[in-house]
Amino acid sequence: KGRVTVSYHDGLEVARRAAQELNGMLVGGIAISASVSSSASDGGYDGAPIDESVSKSSGEPPQPPPAPMYSGDKLVPENFAACKRVPKLPPNPGVPRAYATKLADERALPTLLSMLSELMRLQIRSKDDKNARARRRLVMGLREVARGIRAHKVKMVVMANNLDQYGAIDSKLEEILELARAENLPVLFELNKRKLGKSLGKSIKVSVVGVQNADGAHEQFKKLKKMMGMA
């Protein structure tokens, strides 16, 4: 271990960018800790740190650099540490939110589960068909479902009743509900994210599903619409 001084003659910003790129880099199994220091003259180095508050042209005091992150006794590279510093969403309580209203008919849940599992089975079976994408029965995810509604392909929306309360998610949720109202589409809220994923044979949580083609489960599809008064 030791110290190496590198001089840059192209200005402070160039030196600062170089230090940011070098900081956390592994060389020979050792993590580099890089920083920018001031020069006492055109060619000399006095080892004193730069006063960042006066080096900014905007005149605003800069944000202090983030504290280094360690895994055991090893320094975590800054590009990975930055990802870990992203604020986490609050825990989802797992209960239905105000936007979700379940059907009072006790037949709704088993009928919905039957429809989703059968449509997913048929979709998986046809995945090797070169035209399968054009005839997809189900689409999943907030963006995909919104896109399908705009394209007038989605015939029914199955929305998880416990989506995370978060700005971007709530915005997409409202967008889908407004699009569904404009298209007069049935929207079901019988399942939470985990159960919706499980109904499709997946081990992950699923936020929303759009039914594009009910062939193979048309009977269940019609029953659900009738329960919603949309037959």
Image: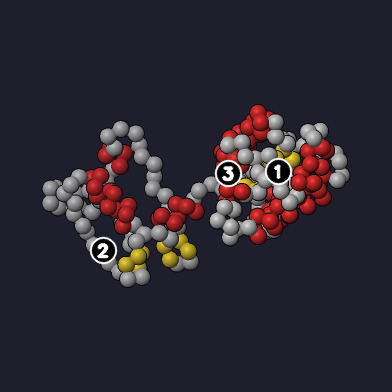
Q: Position of residue 188 (x, y in %)?
A: 74, 40
Counting residues from the start of the chain, the first of labels 2 and 3 encountered is 2
Find residue 203 and report its horizontal and vertical position in percent: 66, 59
Dot 3 crowding, Cα within 10 Å, few <14, some 14–19, many 20+: some
Percent across and percent down for residue 14 are 24, 47
**Location of mark 1 (residue):** 158
Residue 213 falls left or right of residue 26: right
| Callout in the foreground (2, 3) | 3
Closest to the camera, between mark 2 and mark 1, is 1
Marks 2 and 3 sit apart, C-alpha to C-alpha, by 53 Å
Residue kind at label 2, given as amino acid type: Arg
- Farthest residue to the right: give it: 106
User: Looking at this rendering, what residue extends furthest in the bottom direction?
Assistant: 28
Asked where in the image residue 221 lies, by quadrant, the reply is top right
Point 58% across, 48% down: residue: 134
Q: Amino acid at mark 1?
A: Val
Nearest the eye: 150 or 7: 150
The quarter in which the N terminus is drawn is bottom left
What secondary structure is marked by label 2? Answer: loop
Q: Amino acid at mark 3?
A: Glu
Quadrant that contains the C terminus: top right
Indicate which disc, 3 or 1, sits on the residue closer to the N terminus.
Answer: 3
- The reply to whether residue 55 is visible in this rendering is yes
The answer to whether residue 81 is above or below residue 155 is below
Residue on which the image places disc 3: 144
Viewer-nearest residue: 58 or 54: 58
Say what secondary structure mark 3 lies in: helix
Residue under label 2: 3
Residue drawn at x 27%, y 67% is: 2
What's the distance in space between the residues labelled 3 and 1, CA to CA? 13 Å
Report the side of 21 relative to 123 (left or right): left
